[in-house]
Amino acid sequence: MCLKNILLIGLMACALSGCEKNDSQQAMVLEGKTMGTVWRVSVAGVEPQRKATLQQMIQQQLDHDDGELSTWKPDSVLSQFNQYQGTAAQPVSADMADIVTLALRIGKKTAGAMDITVGPLVNLWGFGPTQQPLHTPTDAEIAAAKALSGLQHLRVIQGVAGQWLQKDLPGLYVDLSTMGEGYATDHLARLMEQQGITNYLVSVGGAVLSRGVNANQLPWRVAIQKPTDRENAVEARVDLQGHGISTSGSYRNYYELDGKRISHVIDPSTGRPIEHKLVSATVIATTALEADGWDTGLMVLGSERAQALALKEHLAVYLITKQGDGFSHWMSPQFKSFLIDQKSQ
């Protein structure tokens, strides 16, 4: 599974001001930290005196989300569910039920490649709240961690009186890090709408969502970054048209262990980090949460299987694959409609 706690993995930070180099007017920009990454909000047509209040409201919303989803905080709602060593249904918020329901749906469609129950494997390989291992985990350790995972052991119960999560495996450990950024990004968009703000670009980590236009009455634009260390290397630019976008990448979050590069993207079927050539998967969807869920599953599948699934599910997908000393890219027909180069300027 993939932990996207790096600033805008694959998405250029310039996107948050519209990627317009000749802007005569500037959007109001607010930013801060959450979920081990950064958040940023750009709004147009908002009075400057509202900035401090908006900053506070945004941070409060994100602190609330972190208090639900964090696996790093022992008192979060999710951590309490993971610590519970029983099988009785546990009450959760409607938002928590929604994120798990979507995760289970995408997990099924990706044949388990997107699996929010692989927390034990994420922790085993040193990408969770536990420390990085000193040596490569053994086959026995991997098998033991895999035995504590599986989407079939988790279900959401929706009722008139509320929502519950239930596990039939007491040691099941759920990790929602892979969808947390999209979840929080959608909440920021909802907050903007509640505040009467209709022109905004919001992001948490590698998930972005936009509505309306920037300060120059032009569409908000997001640049997809090439998988290099050069900050301004642009692969493609898109007009989100009110959609959410998320990128999962394997080329920045890794470490060296026993002389081998260890990717943070874990394949649930093997219990090991991926080793294929796909280095970046970008998805555009109706919500940032949905985009955030799909990009992880596609990264696990690898280029060929990801392409096949994108076509089958009619997803807007952009894949970057390592090829020799360079990279190749592939995009689905649905993604092409968002490309700025395909539109009139």
Image (cartoon, rainbow, N blue to C red):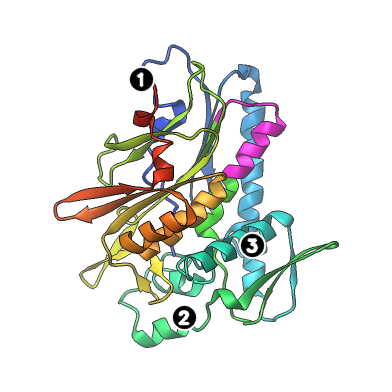
For label 1, the SS is loop
The Cα–Cα distance between marks 2 and 3, rounded to whole angstroms, is 21 Å
Q: From the viewer's perspective, is 106 left or right of 21? A: right
Q: Quadrant of the C terminus?
A: top left
Can you give x and y, in whole percent of width and height, for residue 267 in the image? Answer: 39, 70
The Cα–Cα distance between marks 2 and 1, rounded to whole angstroms, is 49 Å
**Residue receiving disc 2:** 146
Q: Which residues are magenta?
A: 185-200
Q: Which of marks 3 and 1 precedes in the sequence?
A: 1
Label 2 vs label 3, nearer the camera: 3
Can you give x and y, in whole percent of width and height, for residue 332 in the image? Answer: 38, 48
**Kind of residue indicated by mark 1:** Lys
For label 2, the SS is helix
Q: Are marks 2 and 3 in contact (CB under 8 Å)?
A: no
Q: Which of marks 1 and 2 precedes in the sequence?
A: 1
**Residue receiving disc 1:** 21
**Kind of residue indicated by mark 3:** Thr
Q: Which mark is residue 185?
A: none
**Residue receiving disc 3:** 101
